[in-house]
Image (cartoon, rainbow, N blue to C red):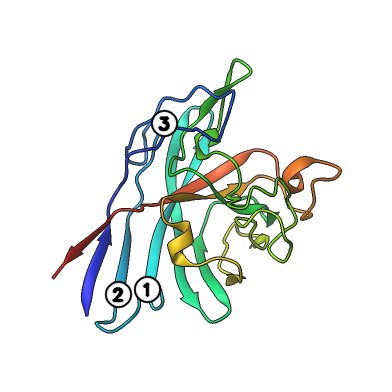
Amino acid sequence: MRKVLLSSLAVLPLAACSGLSVGVGVGGGSGNVGVGASASVDVGSNAPAGSTSRVTVTMYKIDDNGIGAEIGTLSLMDTRGGLEVIPKLRGLPPGPRGFHVHENPNCGPALKDGKMVAGLAAGNHYDPNATGKHEGPKGDGHRGDLPVLMVDKDGNATERLLAFRLQVSAVRGRAFVIHEGGDNFSDQPKPFGGGGARIACGVVSQQWDEAQ
């Protein structure tokens, strides 16, 4: 098999996020704005692109000051039932957490209403059909709406998730974001399921470098 390495990618402008002023960059776990995440993929010689690829995305804690410590990984793979997400995460608040794919490959903070906001550079939920609706993974709204991430009493998340409307190819150049609150898969009584602040994030680069 050939080994494919997804390298860090510089951030695209936040064209879809009006009203935000963002400084962008790519850095490691202590960067103030951007974050680079790497992923390794095993690709069969006769496999269609994206069909049997397993991508590993590194996740980091985030706050208003930037990118914090690494908290584990997400393992992504296309299946017949959609995008399989296997988290191996630690150090999260116990309980259900809102979990989404966001538009931009940037985990840094951004300026909103005069204040820096954690993870806002990731933009809004991935919504290629411009539905403007948060209806959860089984709804007809944001394509980036994922099942709730369950965190155990020790702060670990390891439960497999399946997003049937997504594929590995769709999440390249996007960010996975974990929120401090849960998700009721509705915009009522609060927008975006009521998840609140963004507390962890990881980027899937859209740049693929092949090594023979």
Mark 2 or mark 1: name the one nearer the start of the chain.
2
Q: Position of residue 65 (x, y in %)?
A: 48, 27
Per the image, the residue denoted by label 1 is 53
Q: Residue at x 71, y 47 (%)?
A: 181
Considering the image in quadrants, where does the C terminus appear?
bottom left
Most foreground residue, 87 or 49: 49
Residue furthest to the front in view is: 129
Q: Position of residue 169 (x, y in %)?
A: 43, 63
Distance in Å between CA atoms under marks 2 and 1: 6 Å
Is 7 left, or right, of 120 in this rendering? left
Distance in Å between CA atoms under marks 3 and 1: 29 Å
Q: Quadrant of residue 82?
A: bottom right
Per the image, the residue denoted by label 3 is 33
Mark 3 or mark 2: name the one nearer the start of the chain.
3
Discs 2, 1 touching: Cβ within 8 Å: yes
Residue 42 is tagged as 2
41 up-or-down from 27: above or below: below
Most foreground residue, 209 or 114: 209
Q: Position of residue 20 (x, y in %)?
A: 55, 24
Label 2 residue SS? strand
Most foreground residue, 207 or 7: 207
Is 93 left, or right, of 29 in this rendering? right
- Say which amino acid is labelled 2: Asp
Label 3 residue SS? loop
Q: Position of residue 195 (x, y in %)?
A: 71, 45
37 up-or-down from 4: above or below: above
- Say which amino acid is labelled 3: Val
208 up-or-down from 179: above or below: below
